[in-house]
Image (cartoon, rainbow, N blue to C red):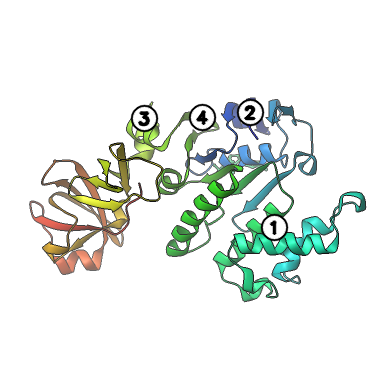
């Protein structure tokens, strides 16, 4: 189902949280709303959901003008960062909830609900946990229950507001990969809010970069990263390292770096771009284990971390690394040194 937002304005008092936003989201797309805090991402998501009404402009879902419809009528599924599950209900009951509270004439039979919930728990890989209570689950498991609950009512679109924001980095990354796969399997139009560039670049088909209630740029991750339309997008996307290359024999070859490309839809010979965040660039002492070597240009200590500006010794591309101060001091790095780098995580 497609979503069409047409010149939407949302004010809180005299403050314009959304300033004439127009956006077209295609059926089955996974779109990220990306921007700094206060840029209007959540407000836009809430306007699409019907949790907030637009002061001006229109919202269409699947071609229907839903501007005046309430949340239920819009048939959207949503998951929030702190979307509390019902604590007194088991995982099964939480997921079944939306189906059980339907009016009698459209409520599925008990056996049907049972089958549907089992199917969803399989989908979110929580099959064995249906009798647990939310308190007996990890944060990542809870968010997967929340997702299963949102999907149970077969929403037209799925809206996610920083769904993994409260989780630790490792879990967050795993869930991200998992969400991408789930989305591809279901092909449900999905909009998610994030302030994390890496998350948007890794997960989304298209990224909507927002600032001060306006859209600064809409494009594929590659477009917004490589061809920023204005200084804001350039700055905002700046803190990600980028490596260019091509797919060969199912492997992404990015200069001296090689990564398995089986998770992308790209074919042999196609150009590919890898993204690495500065904190995923590790300085190692074993040169033979390095992904690449680089020369240290500048060193900027920032609180407990140290940011290093480097250049790749082979292709002279600019690289940023962020290491913690203890590691930095241990390694005794100086400007002008040549160091071995390991990329802990590279998204393609
Ligand atoms: P964050 O990443 O911090 O959640 P965001 O990009 O999602 O930020 P919004 O939550 O959409 O931003 O908020 C946009 C602006 O609108 C902010 O300046 C916020 O203070 C303001 N705002 C949001 N909701 C309300 C409200 N109910 N009343 C008044 N102002 C609001």
Nearer mark to the viewer, of 4 and 2: 2
Q: What number is the disc on residue 228?
A: 3
Q: Which residue is mark 2?
A: 5
Circles 1 and 2, Cβ within 8 Å, touching? The answer is: no
Distance, label 1 to label 2, CA atoms, is: 26 Å
Give coordinates of residue 326: x percent, y percent: 24, 68
> Which one is closest to the eye, mark 1 or mark 2?
1
Mark with earlier residue (1, 3): 1
Q: Quadrant of residue 123?
A: bottom right
SS at circle 1:
helix
Q: Which residue is mark 1?
A: 149
Give the structural element (helix, strand or loop) at label 2. Answer: strand
Measure the alpha-carbon separation of dots 1 and 4. Answer: 31 Å
Residue identified by numbered label 4:
215
Q: Is residue 265 left or right of residue 259?
A: right
Label 2: few (<14), some or many (≥20) within 10 Å?
A: many
Q: Residue at x 69, y 68 (%)?
A: 91
Q: Is 37 situated left or right of 89 in this image?
A: left
Precedes in sequence: disc 4 or disc 2: 2
Query: Marks 4 and 3: in contact by CB < 8 Å?
Result: no
- For the residues carrying marks 1 and 4, which lies nearer the camera in this image? 1
**Foreground: 26 or 318?**
26
């Amino acid at each position: 189902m497609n979503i069409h937002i047409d010149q939407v304005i949302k004010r809180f008092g005299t403050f314009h949280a959304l300033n004439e936003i127009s956006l077209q989201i295609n059926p089955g797309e996974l779109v990220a709303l990306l921007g700094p805090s206060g840029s209007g991402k959540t407000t836009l998501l809430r306007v699409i959901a019907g949790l907030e009404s637009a002061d001006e402009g229109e919202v269409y879902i699947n071609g229907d003008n839903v501007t005046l419809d309430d949340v239920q009528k819009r048939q959207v599924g949503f998951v929030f960062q702190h979307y509390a599950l019902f604590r007194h209900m088991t995982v099964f009951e939480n997921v079944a909830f939306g189906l059980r509270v339907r009016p009698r004439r459209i409520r599925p039979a008990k056996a049907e609900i049972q089958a549907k919930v089992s199917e969803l728990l399989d989908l979110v890989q929580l099959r064995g946990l249906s009798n647990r209570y939310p308190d007996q689950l990890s944060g990542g498991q809870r968010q997967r229950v929340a997702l299963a609950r949102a999907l149970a009512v077969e929403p037209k679109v799925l809206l996610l507001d920083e769904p993994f924001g409260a989780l630790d980095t490792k879990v967050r990354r795993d869930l991200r990969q998992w969400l991408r796969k789930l989305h591809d399997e279901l092909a449900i139009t999905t909009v998610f809010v994030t302030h994390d560039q890496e998350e948007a670049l890794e997960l989304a088909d298209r990224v909507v970069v927002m600032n001060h209630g306006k859209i600064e740029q809409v494009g594929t991750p590659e477009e917004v990263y490589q061809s920023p339309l204005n200084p804001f997008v350039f700055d905002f996307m700046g803190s990600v390292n980028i490596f260019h290359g091509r797919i060969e024999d199912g492997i992404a070859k990015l200069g001296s770096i090689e990564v398995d490309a089986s998770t992308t839809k790209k074919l042999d010979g196609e150009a590919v771009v890898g993204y690495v965040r500065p904190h995923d660039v590790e300085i190692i002492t074993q040169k033979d284990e390095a992904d690449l070597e680089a020369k240290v240009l500048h060193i900027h200590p920032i609180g407990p971390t140290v940011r290093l500006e480097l250049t790749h010794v082979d292709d002279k591309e600019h690289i940023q690394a962020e290491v913690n101060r203890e590691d930095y001091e241990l390694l005794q790095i100086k400007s002008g040194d040549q160091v071995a780098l390991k990329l802990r995580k590279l998204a393609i």
